[in-house]
Image (cartoon, rainbow, N blue to C red):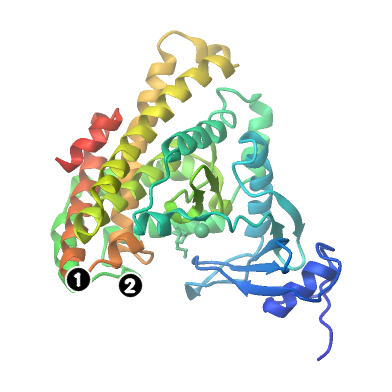
Amino acid sequence: MTRKDFTQEYFRFNEQDAIDYSVEILNYFDSKEGLECLEIGDGNLNYIFKVYNGAGRSVIIKQAGPIARISDDIKLSPDRNRIESEILKIQYKLTDGGVPEVYNYDSKMNCTAMEDLSDHIILRTGLLNYQVFPELSDQLATFMVETLLPTSDIVMEHKEKKNMVKNFINPELCEISEDLVFTEPYYDAERNDMLPETQKIVSDLIWQDRELKLAVAKLKYKFMTNTEALIHGDLHSGSIFAKEDSAKVIDPEFAFYGPAGYDVGNVLAHFIFSILNARYSEKAPNEFTSWIRNVLGDTLDKFLAYYNEEWDRLVTDEMAKVEGFKENYISDLLSDTASFAGTEIIRRIIGLAHVEDIVSLPKEQRLLAEKEALLIGKRLILESNSFKTGQDYLNLFQ
Ligand code: SR1
Ligand code: MG
């Protein structure tokens, strides 16, 4: 076989290419002898290669292709890999290692080499196995405060912040969210994907509800126009690696300057999915059920407490110090959080991209869980101003 040239034309790697690349380009291993590689990606867009030797040394190579893995119809610039590698470096500094360390970014092969976190598992997988992670709410609340507040106008020098907005403009990935989160679930779109029984409910509960559709239209425009903070943009339990005493956030390719409540709302939405899974699968031990409910409430409460504290410590803009401004700002952030949790829940039931927490349930339970999720999503959007504390979210399940 002819040797492939990693310095010329882009091509999509197979497992042997990833091994060759890790030695010839990254110099991460001294030789190819004994190296093995697995393609371990289970996301919707990219290919993830883990290259490892028998002596405990390993590296992850994440490569972006010109079409999404989930659908040949979704064409995307592989430049998203650059955005991801740059965001990872920023978040690594802001969170003191709360994301994988980036070793190398390659603009020809559209791939990033990074730290292997295989001693962690994908949080969603852990939650589906009813595994408890004692420090999760603390870790996620801290991650969100450390990435959202210091990248906002409250803290940053305003010209520098505007420059960041420019550098992290992410039109294609934003378009995916604009379509899949804020548009297609609200009409009978071709890409929607539901069981016929759920579609009947959706037609009544969602498509006929004019008040809801107006609220979501406003949220879509907030998502597109509010450059509040450098958000992760896809912060769900499939984008978090966890183990007993550690949580690391991965996959920030949807990152851009957007509304901070989008990240917080996404995190809460996926805890709600986990709670629904536990309730409808009827297999979850009581210990897990009460733990995951606490995680939902505590994540918001701890986020709020830490955000408040950090605001006072980090605020630089004079007008952000005006009495009452912080309270007003945080009240808006909380309302956004509830609304974006609602849109995330609804889109995962109706749209193209689902969550295992719900689709892995036996059909009868899945239908019940989907109906409850839709009702919760609607309440979060239509009553967003009344979700101010963790307890307000817990009350959804009473
Ligand atoms: C076409 S990508 C579908 C979904 O997968 C990603 O994780 C995002 O959530 C996106 O909406
Ligand atoms: Mg992802």
For the C terminus, the quadrant is top left
* Dot 1 or dot 2, earlier in sequence: 2
Q: Are marks 1 and 2 in contact (CB under 8 Å)?
A: no
Across and down, in percent, residue 54 comes to 72, 69
Which residue corresponds to mark 1?
A: 363
Which residue corresponds to mark 2?
A: 190
Tell me which residue sits at (44%, 17%) in the image: 326
Q: Which residue is nearer to you in this view: 107 or 63?
A: 63
Tell me which residue sits at (38%, 52%) in the image: 131
The three-letter amino acid code for the residue at tag 2 is Glu
For residue 101, side relative to residue 345 (left or right): right
Across and down, in percent, residue 278 comes to 25, 54
The three-letter amino acid code for the residue at tag 1 is Lys
Label 1 residue SS: helix
For residue 93, side relative to residue 366 (left or right): right
Q: Which of the 4 quarters of the picture holds residue 347?
A: bottom left
Q: Which residue is nearer to you in this view: 64 or 362?
A: 362
Q: Which of the 4 quarters of the picture holds residue 19?
A: bottom right
Label 2 residue SS: loop
